[in-house]
Image (spheres, rainbow, N blue to C red):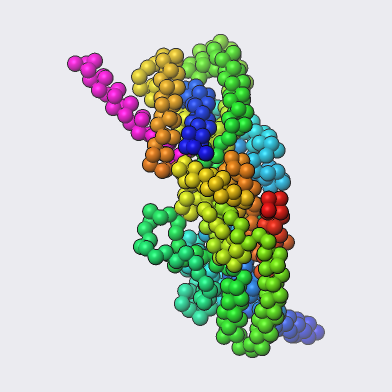
C-alpha cells in the first residue's frame, strides 16, 4: 500500500465533512449555540454505550440506531427549551448541562462494560485514518440527503437562524422548525463523530464559519470562504501529519487553529490598507 | 426477669461477635490484577480472601478510582502489585487515601510480584517523555509467561507464610499442587500450540512480549506507534505493509481497546482481528491462571486454523 492509498480516504472524508459542516456551522454560529455539536455528539455517544450494554456491537447498525434515537431526544430538548422566557435561562446553559450529564452517564455505563472501554477516548480523539471507502460512500449519501433537505427549506432555516424576531412575526412555528434543524444536525453529527472524533468535527463546524465572518456578511461569500478554507486546511493538515509523522486528526485541528490566526492577521492588514 | 433477658442478650451477642471474629480471621489479600488474586487464592486456599482492584477486562494502566477500592485497601493485610510502574497512574493516591501504612511501598504488607520474574524490553538507552508511555524498568506485562506465573506463585507463598506463619504448611502444600498442575498444563499447551510456533503477529498494545516468547510467536509490530498515542499515517502505513509483506495472519487486541483502528487495518490487509485476554477475568469463563492460557491458546488456534 502506498502513502497515497492510505491518505486518500482520510482526505476525501475531510472534504465531505467540510461540505456539510461549514454550512451547518453558519447556522450554529448565528444562533450562538456553539457547543450544540459537542452536546449532541455526547448524547449520541451515550446512546451507543447504552446499545452496547444491551448487547450490540459498538460499530454495528443496532448501536447506530440507538445513538440516533438518543440524538433525536436531545434535538427535542434543545428545540423546545430554546430560551426559557420566564426565567431567562439561556439555551447554551441547557446545551452545556446536556453535555455534562450525557458525558457522565456514558462513563457510568461504560464502567459496567467489559469490552472496548477505550471507546470513549477513541470517540473524543478519533482516528480519521481508519475510515474506509464503504463508510465514506454511506456518509456522502446521508449528507447529500440532509443537504437537500436544508436546500429545500433554506428560507425557513436561514431566517430563523439570522432573524428570529422576523420569523416569529410571520407566525412560523419556530419550535417545530428548530426540532427539524436539530434532528438533521443530529443525523450529521452522529455519523461524523464516528468517523473523525469530537475534536475534529467541532473544528469542521465552527472554524470555517468563524473565519468567513472575518471577511463578509453575505451568506454566499461566507459559504464560499468556509468551503475553500475547509478543503485547503484539510489537505494541508493531512499532508503535515504525514510529513511530520503526527496523529492525523489532531494535526488537522491544529492546522485549523493556525489558519484562523493567519486569516485574522490578513484581515487586520487589509483593513489598515483600506483606511490608509 | 428483665435482668435475665438482658444477660442472655449480652452473652448471645458476645458469642456472635466471637464467631464472627473467627470467620473474619481470613487474611485479606488485595491485588492490582486479577491474575495475582487468582494465584493468591490458589496458594492461600481457605485462609485468604482476595480482591482485585483492576478487573481482567479493564485497562490495567488506568483504573477509575471508586470508594470501594479505598475501602478494600484500608482493610488489606497484603497488597500485591505488578510493579514496573504499571499501576503508577492510579495506585499511589489510592494507597495514600487508604491510611493503611502496612501496604505502603517497601513496608511488610506490600509485595511487588515482578521480583525474580523474567522481565523483557528493559530500555538500554535513556528514557525521555518523547518516547510516550514507555516503562523504564521493562515491559510490565510479564505475567503472560506461565513460567513467570510459577515464580509469582512462589513469591506469594513465601509472603503469605511470613505474614501468617500458622498457615505455612497449607501454603507449601498448595504451592506444590499449583506447580504440579502448571507442569502438566505446560506440556498440554506446548503440544497444542506447537504447529503454530513461529507465527507472525501484530499486536495493538505492547502487552504480549512474554507470551510471545514462551509460546513462540513473533511480534512484528504494534498498532500503537508509542503506547498510549494514536497511530500516525507513516506508522499505520508501515504496519500495513509489514502485514502484507510478511503475510501476518492476525492482529491481537486487548479487550479494553476500541477495535475500530485494528479492524480498518485488517480490512486493508486481509488479516484477522483477534481479541486476546491478557488477564484472568477478561471474560467470566477465565477464572484461574490456568484458564487464562487455555482460553487464549484456544482463541489463537481457532483464528490460525483457517490460515495455517
In x, y percent, where is residue B203?
56, 54
Q: Is residue B256 magenta?
A: no
> Is A158 situated left or right of A213 in this image?
right
Residue B167 in view, yes or no:
no
Q: Does the image show residue A204?
A: yes
Seen from the viewer's position, the closer of residues B70 and B247 is: B247
| Residue B129, picture quadrant | bottom left
* B26 vs A211, nearest the viewer: A211
Residues A247 and B268: in front is B268
- Which residue is at 57% across, 20% downward? A147
Please give the range of residues in magenta: A248-276
Is residue A255 placed above or below B282 in the rendered structure?
above
Q: Against B91, is B302 above or below?
A: above
Q: Main secondary structure of the magenta part?
A: helix
Residue drawn where x is 45% and y is 43% of the image: B234
In percent of width and height, residue A115 lies at 64, 52
Query: The C terminus of chain A is located in which quarter?
Result: top left
Which corner quadrant of the image does residue A258 belong to? top left
Q: x, y (%) of residue A240?
A: 39, 37
Instruction: Tell me, yes or no, whether the highlighted magenta stretch contains residue A260.
Output: yes
Amino acid at each position: 500500500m502506498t502513502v497515497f492509498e492510505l491518505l486518500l480516504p482520510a482526505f476525501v472524508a475531510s472534504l465531505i465533512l467540510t461540505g456539510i459542516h461549514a454550512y451547518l456551522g453558519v447556522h450554529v454560529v448565528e444562533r450562538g449555540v456553539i457547543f450544540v455539536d459537542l452536546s449532541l455528539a455526547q448524547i449520541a455517544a451515550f446512546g451507543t454505550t447504552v446499545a452496547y450494554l444491551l448487547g450490540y456491537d459498538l460499530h454495528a447498525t443496532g448501536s447506530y440506531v440507538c445513538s440516533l434515537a438518543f440524538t433525536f431526544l436531545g434535538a427535542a430538548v434543545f428545540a423546545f427549551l430554546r430560551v426559557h422566557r420566564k426565567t431567562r435561562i439561556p439555551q447554551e446553559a441547557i446545551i452545556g448541562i446536556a453535555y455534562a450529564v450525557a458525558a457522565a452517564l456514558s462513563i457510568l455505563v461504560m464502567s459496567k462494560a467489559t469490552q472496548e472501554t477505550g471507546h470513549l477516548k477513541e470517540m473524543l480523539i478519533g482516528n480519521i485514518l481508519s475510515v474506509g471507502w464503504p463508510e465514506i460512500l454511506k456518509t456522502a449519501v446521508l449528507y447529500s440527503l440532509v443537504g437537500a433537505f436544508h436546500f429545500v427549506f433554506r428560507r425557513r432555516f436561514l431566517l430563523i437562524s439570522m432573524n428570529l424576531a422576523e420569523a416569529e412575526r410571520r407566525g412560523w412555528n419556530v419550535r417545530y422548525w428548530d426540532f427539524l434543524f436539530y434532528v438533521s444536525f443530529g443525523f450529521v453529527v452522529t455519523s461524523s463523530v464516528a468517523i473523525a472524533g469530537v475534536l475534529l468535527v467541532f473544528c469542521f463546524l465552527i472554524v470555517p464559519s468563524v473565519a468567513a465572518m472575518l471577511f463578509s456578511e453575505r451568506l454566499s461569500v461566507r459559504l464560499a470562504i468556509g468551503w475553500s478554507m475547509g478543503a485547503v486546511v484539510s489537505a494541508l493538515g493531512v499532508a503535515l501529519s504525514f510529513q511530520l509523522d503526527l496523529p492525523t486528526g489532531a494535526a488537522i485541528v491544529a492546522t485549523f487553529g493556525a489558519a484562523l490566526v493567519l486569516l485574522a492577521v490578513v484581515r487586520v492588514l487589509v483593513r489598515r490598507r483600506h483606511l490608509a | 426477669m428483665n435482668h435475665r433477658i438482658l444477660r442472655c442478650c449480652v452473652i448471645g451477642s458476645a458469642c456472635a461477635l466471637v464467631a464472627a471474629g473467627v470467620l473474619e480471621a481470613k487474611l485479606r489479600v488485595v491485588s492490582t490484577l486479577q491474575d495475582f488474586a487468582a494465584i493468591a487464592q490458589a496458594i492461600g486456599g481457605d485462609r485468604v480472601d482476595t480482591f482485585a482492584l483492576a478487573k481482567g477486562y479493564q485497562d490495567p494502566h488506568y483504573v477509575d478510582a471508586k470508594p470501594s477500592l479505598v475501602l478494600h485497601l484500608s482493610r488489606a493485610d497484603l497488597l500485591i502489585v505488578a510493579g514496573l510502574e504499571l499501576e503508577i497512574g492510579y495506585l499511589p493516591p489510592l494507597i495514600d487515601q487508604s491510611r493503611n501504612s502496612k501496604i505502603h511501598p517497601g513496608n511488610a504488607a506490600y509485595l511487588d510480584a515482578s521480583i525474580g520474574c523474567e522481565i523483557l524490553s528493559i530500555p538500554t538507552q535513556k528514557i525521555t517523555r518523547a518516547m510516550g508511555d514507555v516503562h523504564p524498568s521493562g515491559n510490565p506485562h510479564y505475567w503472560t509467561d506461565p513460567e513467570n506465573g510459577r515464580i509469582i506463585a512462589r513469591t506469594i507463598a513465601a509472603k503469605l507464610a511470613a505474614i501468617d506463619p500458622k498457615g505455612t504448611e497449607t501454603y507449601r502444600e498448595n504451592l506444590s499442587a499449583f506447580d504440579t498442575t502448571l507442569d502438566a498444563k505446560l506440556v498440554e499447551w506446548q503440544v497444542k500450540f506447537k504447529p503454530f510456533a513461529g507465527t507472525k503477529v501484530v499486536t495493538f498494545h505492547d502487552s504480549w512480549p512474554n507470551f510471545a516468547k514462551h509460546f513462540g510467536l513473533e511480534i512484528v509490530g504494534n498498532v500503537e506507534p508509542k503506547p498510549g498515542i494514536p497511530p500516525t499515517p507513516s506508522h499505520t502505513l508501515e504496519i500495513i505493509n509489514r502485514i502484507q509483506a510478511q503475510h501476518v495472519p492476525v492482529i491481537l487486541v486487548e479487550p479494553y481497546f476500541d477495535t475500530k483502528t485494528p479492524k480498518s487495518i485488517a480490512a486493508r490487509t486481509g488479516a484477522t482481528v483477534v481479541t486476546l485476554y491478557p488477564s484472568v477475568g477478561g471474560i467470566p469463563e477465565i477464572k484461574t491462571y490456568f484458564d487464562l492460557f487455555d482460553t487464549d491458546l484456544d482463541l489463537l488456534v481457532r483464528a490460525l486454523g483457517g490460515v495455517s
